[in-house]
Image (cartoon, coloured by chain):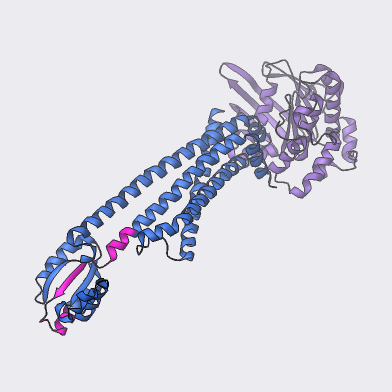
């Protein structure tokens, strides 16, 4: 699904990403970890096509992102769901409108909006907060809202850049449970995080970066694919959200 | 409601004074545009009125035969420089005289048709043809006298009036063009400034939209709709106020200018005139908002 092949990105004298290669398969949950400045966010930005690699290829669902024309970028971004550390919610819109905007961008017919938004709201546990504005929500709720916005477009890849960075341990844990749940639904997740406690707890594939280079990849070193047993069984018999709807059927 | 329209309305609602400033400037612009268009139309009508009425008169010698007069008449009729060639018999000339002296019947009782010469009247396509045509006609054997029509006070008055009217019409068009250009330029700059200000506030929103895969058109749509709402409101109010003032002044204007049709003669023609004016102004407003929003988006993106 996602393949980075000898990708390098240089900012002035700083080599942010240095000849990195790795693959992410369908349904995988991959942590990218490492200290600040190791290149985690740069990788997310490269996949989002916010920046272009100086060399190497990034293949997402058969498309080389490096050679993508500007007008084709929105289309590829619509296939991804993005969650940021600072939530990136539109403060002038209610939570419902923040989620609906993804549907509008993805040109989903308006008569489907309410069902899809309420389904996602239930999944992230925010169905009673939908008409509140971001300033009226707590950090954990904002991050769940951001996750809902990322999910409502039914993306095949979720990119998360330090999604627990601004949250306390308990809230971060709740958010991670949600990511786990979504991964069990079959969604591929690529998460940049330096939260070691969380990474160790969730036992997924971990790609460790240092000074822009991959220094460890648990898929290579221990054969850990990132697809846990739970998920494998979920693929055969998908886990249902509370209201019984399958995310893939949205 | 459409999501872009809703966003546009919300943006207006959040900063009503900026919106009011934009609408007010556009109102003034389109009010001035409407008034100037009416002015230009009326000055053109006045000029046309003087240019197209009979301007040259040929007095025929008493001994001229009907066939000679007919020959001259058809010669004039075939001249492309001339139009509206009209033959006035001695009897018709007397009638005209009687009409002109109806307040003093004694004057008309004392004259007979034989006193008046028959004449040929015509107007020229362009007043510059008048002089050469007159000198050509003076050499005709049946022509007694040739000159400018006396209805406007004679040769000098007519040329003076038309020349002055042409000059006035030219200055109205020139000044109108400059004033309209100035107002449209001001409106455009103000619209770009106001939209840019609003977009700087919405920078975060635009960045988020960009990240979740919104196309440039999607991001631009509410901005364009917002400026379109300003333009449409400005156009409609400016046009409507000028229309009301015009309707209010119509009786006085008609009375003052009498037989000069400075305004469309029928109600239908008047509505048609104002309808076309509104359509043109709406098109200009549309172009203004399109240009304004494209410039504002480009400016904000450049800053990013």
Range of residues picked out in magenta: B46-71
**Residue A250, can we see it?**
no
> Residue A125 at x, y = what percent?
86, 33
**Residue B108, can we see it?**
yes
> Residue B37 at x, y = what percent?
41, 52
| Frontmost residue, A196 versus B34 | B34
**Residue at screen point 61% across, 18% down:** A15
Give the vertical position of B288 relative to B112 (above or below). Answer: above
Q: Which chain is purple?
A: A
> Residue A164 at x, y = what percent?
79, 22
> Residue A92 at x, y = what percent?
70, 33
Q: Is residue A7 left or right of residue B166?
A: right
Q: Is residue A6 left or right of residue B64?
A: right
Q: Is residue B69 magenta?
A: yes
Q: Is residue A7 magenta?
A: no
Q: Which chain is blue?
A: B
């Amino acid at each position: 699904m996602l393949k980075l092949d000898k990708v390098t990105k240089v900012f002035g004298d700083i080599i942010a990403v240095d000849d990195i290669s790795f693959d992410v398969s369908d349904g995988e949950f991959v942590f990218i970890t490492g200290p600040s400045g190791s290149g985690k966010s740069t990788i997310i930005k490269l996949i989002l096509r916010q920046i272009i690699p100086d060399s190497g290829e990034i293949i997402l669902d058969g498309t080389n992102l490096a050679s993508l024309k500007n007008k084709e970028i929105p289309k590829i971004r619509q296939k991804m769901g993005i969650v940021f550390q600072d939530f990136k919610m539109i403060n002038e819109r209610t939570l419902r409108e923040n989620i609906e905007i993804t549907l509008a961008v993805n040109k989903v017919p308006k008569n489907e909006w309410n069902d899809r938004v309420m389904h996602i709201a239930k999944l992230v546990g925010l169905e009673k907060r939908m008409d509140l504005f971001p300033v009226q929500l707590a950090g954990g709720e904002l991050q769940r809202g951001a996750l809902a916005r990322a999910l409502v477009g039914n993306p095949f890849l979720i990119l998360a850049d330090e999604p627990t960075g601004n949250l306390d341990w308990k809230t971060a844990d709740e958010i991670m449970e949600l990511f786990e749940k979504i991964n069990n639904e079959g969604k591929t997740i690529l998460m940049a995080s330096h939260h070691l406690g969380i990474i160790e707890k969730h036992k997924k594939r971990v790609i460790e970066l240092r000074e822009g280079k991959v220094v460890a990849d648990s898929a290579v070193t221990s054969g850990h694919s990132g697809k846990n047993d739970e998920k494998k069984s979920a693929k055969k018999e998908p886990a249902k959200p509370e209201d019984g709807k399958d995310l893939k059927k949205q | 409601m459409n999501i872009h329209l809703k966003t546009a309305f919300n943006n207006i609602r959040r900063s009503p004074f900026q919106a009011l400033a934009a609408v007010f400037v556009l109102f003034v612009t389109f009010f001035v545009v409407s008034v100037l268009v009416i002015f230009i139309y009326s000055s053109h009508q006045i000029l046309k009125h003087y240019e197209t009425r009979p301007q040259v008169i040929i007095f025929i010698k008493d001994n001229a035969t009907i066939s000679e007069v007919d020959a001259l008449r058809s010669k004039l009729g075939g001249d492309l420089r001339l139009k509206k060639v009209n033959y006035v018999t001695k009897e018709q000339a007397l009638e005209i005289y009687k009409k002109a002296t109806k307040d003093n019947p004694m004057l008309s009782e004392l004259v007979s048709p034989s006193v008046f010469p028959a004449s040929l009247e015509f107007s020229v396509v362009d007043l510059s043809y008048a002089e050469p045509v007159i000198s050509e006609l003076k050499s005709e054997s049946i022509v007694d006298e040739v000159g400018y029509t006396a209805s406007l006070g004679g040769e000098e008055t007519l040329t003076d009036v038309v020349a002055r009217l042409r000059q006035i019409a030219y200055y109205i068009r020139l000044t109108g063009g400059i004033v309209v250009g100035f107002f449209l330029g001001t409106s455009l700059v103000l619209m770009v400034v106001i939209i840019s200000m609003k977009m700087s506030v919405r920078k975060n929103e635009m960045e988020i939209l960009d990240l979740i895969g919104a196309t440039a058109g999607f991001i631009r749509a509410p901005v364009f709709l917002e400026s379109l709402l300003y333009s449409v409101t400005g156009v409609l109010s400016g046009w409507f106020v000028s229309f009301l003032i015009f309707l209010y002044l119509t009786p006085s204007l008609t009375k003052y200018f009498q037989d000069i049709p400075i305004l469309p003669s029928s109600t239908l023609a008047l509505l048609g005139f104002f309808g076309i004016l509104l359509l043109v102004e709406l098109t200009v407003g549309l172009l203004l908002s399109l240009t304004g929003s494209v410039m504002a988006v480009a400016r904000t993106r450049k800053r990013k």
